[in-house]
Image (spheres, grey):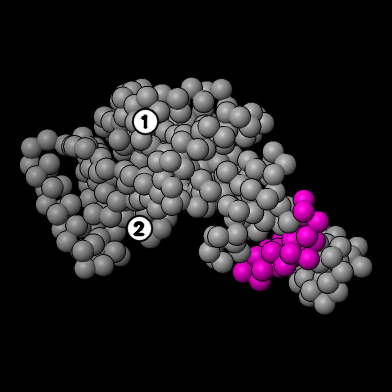
């Protein structure tokens, strides 16, 4: 049966560095949620029948017969509405489509039907957050960690949703708990570093980010966070030492390109700043704000041809201020 991976990604902060950070990511050591353990079921012959249905659905999914599996699950739910396993199975199937809203609704039904197990609350919270329903995600994660307070993954995700909602004191408390439960988890240290950056506590942020980098020295996200710290502290040279060795793909991501441009501008390297933003715009040609900002930087640097190309792109994307450009 398909199980949803945790798709929260720190790449998200690279797309929107002003927004609260989301750190858990399979690419940087995050764990997939485990299957929901022993969902509640009906008893007797009906239970055996549901078990057989679930086996059949599992076999169909192995050969990619998703439509047929879905039809069987819908019929089974209509006949055995009290068996929690069916809602969990249907939620997991919908995640594979993906149909996040449908999956979340079925996790809600599963929680209402049987035991509100910690892992089921966690899975529901993950899907709620994927939908942008962070208030609901907060409720689910809080319930999961209350049921299993020593599970660091539950506390970590709770802390990060608290951070997204601007509850920084609560988030910090949760993340400190994670560092005690799982001191080797770089995501907790990086998240604490993000909180410190948002509060402009640069010395604290430096310590936390250094810890994250020590634990995961090859991860771009921690290098990026340290570069943000260096720019904030007025050391563009140190920021560039961190950013320039990154891959071209990384440097063309919006957030890294913007940080790179800011570091160049602090050194009065306006042409380099413009080129950095233009490269990111070429990578994301549908991003009106990026095209507009690249045009502004190019005009400032006197790169007329580049400025016109970026201005034309911003205008084609209907940026509201494109007409104000020279």
Magenta stretch: includes residue 188: no
Residue 16's x, y, as percent?
62, 49
Name the secondary structure under disc 1.
loop
Between the residue at mark 2 and the residue at mark 1, the CA separation in whole angstroms equals 33 Å
Q: Which residue is mark 1?
A: 183
Query: What is the magenta range?
Result: 265-294
Q: Which SS type dominates the magenta stretch?
A: helix
Left or right of residue 141, residue 291 in this image: right
Tell me: residue 264, above or below residue 146: below
Residue 118 figure quarter:
top left
Query: Which residue is more in the foreground, 240 or 120?
Result: 240
Badge 2: few (under 14), some or many (20 or more) residues near its Cα, within 10 Å? some
Q: Residues within 10 Å of mark 1 (few under 14, many from 20)?
A: some
Apparent side of residue 110 relative to residue 302 in the rendered image (left or right): left
Q: In this orientation, which residue lies closer to the viewer: 93 or 233? A: 233
- Left or right: 45 as drawn, with respect to 276: left
**Residue 202, horizontal then vertical, whole percent:** 63, 32
Residue shown at 25% from the left, 40% from the top: 36
State the image coordinates of residue 15 (x, y, percent, origin top left): 60, 53
Which element carries disc 2, helix, strand or loop?
loop
State whether residue 109 appears in this view: no
Q: Residue at x 64, y 48 (%)?
A: 238
Q: Is residue 105 above or below residue 175?
A: below
Tag count: 2
């Amino acid at each position: 049966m398909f199980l949803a991976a945790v798709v929260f990604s720190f790449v998200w902060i690279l797309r929107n560095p002003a927004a609260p950070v989301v750190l858990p990511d399979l690419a940087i050591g995050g764990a997939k949620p485990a299957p929901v353990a022993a969902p509640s079921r009906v008893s007797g012959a009906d239970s055996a029948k549901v078990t057989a249905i679930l086996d059949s659905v599992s076999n169909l999914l192995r050969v990619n017969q998703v439509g047929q599996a879905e039809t069987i699950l819908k019929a089974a739910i209509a006949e055995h509405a009290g068996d929690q396993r069916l809602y969990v199975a249907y939620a997991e199937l919908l995640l594979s489509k993906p149909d996040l809203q449908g999956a979340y609704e079925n996790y809600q039904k599963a929680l209402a039907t049987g035991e509100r197990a910690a892992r089921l609350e966690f899975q529901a919270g993950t899907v709620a957050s994927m939908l942008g329903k962070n208030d609901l995600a907060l409720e689910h994660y809080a319930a999961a960690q209350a049921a299993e307070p020593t599970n660091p993954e539950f506390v970590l995700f709770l802390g990060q949703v608290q951070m997204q909602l601007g509850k920084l004191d609560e988030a910090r408390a949760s993340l400190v708990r994670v560092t005690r439960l799982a001191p080797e988890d770089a995501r907790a240290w990086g998240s604490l570093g993000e909180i410190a950056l948002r509060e402009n506590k640069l010395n604290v942020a430096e310590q936390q980010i250094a810890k994250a980098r020590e634990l995961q020295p090859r991860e771009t996200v921690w290098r990026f966070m340290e570069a943000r710290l260096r720019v904030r502290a007025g050391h563009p040279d140190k920021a560039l030492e961190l950013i320039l060795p990154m891959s071209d793909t990384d440097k063309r991501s919006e957030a890294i390109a913007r940080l790179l441009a800011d570091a160049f501008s602090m050194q009065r390297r306006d042409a380099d700043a413009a080129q950095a933003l233009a490269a990111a715009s070429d990578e994301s040609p549908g991003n009106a704000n990026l095209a507009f900002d690249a045009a502004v930087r190019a005009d400032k640097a006197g790169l007329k041809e580049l400025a016109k190309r970026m201005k034309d792109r911003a205008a084609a994307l209907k940026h509201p201020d494109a007409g104000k450009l020279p």
